[in-house]
Amino acid sequence: MYAWVWQRLPGPWPARLVICLALIAALVYALFMWVFPWAEEALGISNVTVG
């Protein structure tokens, strides 16, 4: 999968590296802003009781 993404990116390898890092940063941002809060609310992860 990573090789497929790397081959599809335009430009020489320094430009590909910058684009790849930007894609990873966007993915991490999306996870922290939308996916993780939704998962916490939907799955009730914060509702923990210790007996």
Image (tube, rainbow, N blue to C red):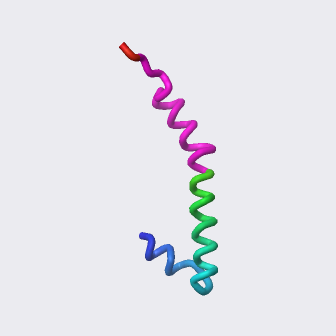
Where is residue 27? Give x, y as percent: 57, 56
Please, is residue 12 above or below residue 9 in the view? below
**Measuring 57% from the left and 62% from the top, which residue is drawn there?**
24
Please, is residue 32 above or below residue 27 in the view? above
**Numbered marks: total:** 0
Along the viewing direction, whichever of 48 and 36 lies nearer the viewer: 48
Please, is residue 42 above or below residue 24 in the view? above
Q: Quadrant of the C terminus?
A: top left
**Measuring 57% from the left and 83% from the top, which residue is drawn there?**
13
Q: Extreme bottom residue here?
A: 12
**Measuring 63% from the left and 44% from the top, which residue is drawn there?**
33
> Where, by quadrant of the figure, is residue 22 drawn?
bottom right
Where is residue 39? Give x, y as percent: 50, 37
Q: Quadrant of the N terminus?
A: bottom left
Along the viewing direction, whichever of 25 and 44 lies nearer the viewer: 25
**Measuring 61% from the left and 81% from the top, which residue is drawn there?**
14
The stretch in magenta equals 30-49
Where is residue 20? Give x, y as percent: 58, 70
Q: Extreme front residue here?
A: 50
Q: Is residue 31 magenta?
A: yes
